[in-house]
Amino acid sequence: MSLYGKILLALDLSAECDQLVEKAREMAQSNSAELYLLHVIEPLSFAYGGDVPMDLTTIQEQLDEHAHNKLNKYAESLGYPVTRQMVVTGHTETEIHRLADELNIDLVIVGSHGRHGLALLLGSTANSVLHGATCDVLAVRVQDKDS
């Protein structure tokens, strides 16, 4: 029996995601696991405090379509079968926790940029996922492409 039967790979769709995809493939292969891909889109209204004097529906739909397209490309590049791809809208940490529980995920893989100073004090997505998870979390340190 494998240690991790279901793995959730949470991607932010940044240039550094290739590093996460490679690690997820290795983990999934070594455990013969089901692999799920997730990208969470934070609603534009969150960024503007919910008080936006215009309709952002079209822009939000474009972001959603772009995310689906990029997630498809990552799934194709994996070289490993993907059980399900998901693009959801909400708070990133909340949605990762919700889906991990809903799908009975054994391992969540997220990227960690290893920030310092103010960014570290404010917390990171990886840190928030780790502290609220009901399953194992693998925070993969990714190197920024421009460093």
Image (spheres, rainbow, N blue to C red):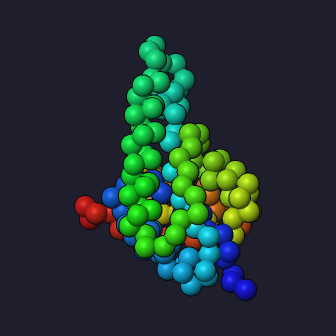
Give the farthest residue toward the left.
146
Q: Is residue 78 left or right of residue 90?
A: left
Q: Position of residue 19 (x, y in %)?
A: 39, 70
Quadrant of the image containing the N terminus: bottom right
Give the farthest residue toward the top.
53
Residue shown at 49% from the left, 80% from the top? 26
- From what the image shows, is residue 130 above or below residue 94? below
- From what the image shows, is residue 103 above or below residue 35? above
Residue shown at 45% from the left, 23% from the top? 56
Residue shown at 48% from the left, 73% from the top? 80
Quadrant of the image containing the C terminus: bottom left
Foreground of the two, 127 or 5: 5
- From what the image shows, is residue 60 above or below residue 113? above
Foreground of the two, 88 or 94: 88
Foreground of the two, 76 or 64: 76
Q: Position of residue 72 (x, y in %)?
A: 43, 55
Q: Position of residue 82 (x, y in %)?
A: 53, 65
Q: In this orientation, does residue 66 appear?
A: yes
Quadrant in which residue 125 is drawn: bottom right
Residue shown at 68% from the left, 83% from the top? 2
Q: Position of residue 43 (x, y in %)?
A: 52, 34
Quadrant in which residue 28 is drawn: bottom right
Quadrant in which residue 22 is drawn: bottom left
Q: Is residue 7 left or right of residue 102?
A: left
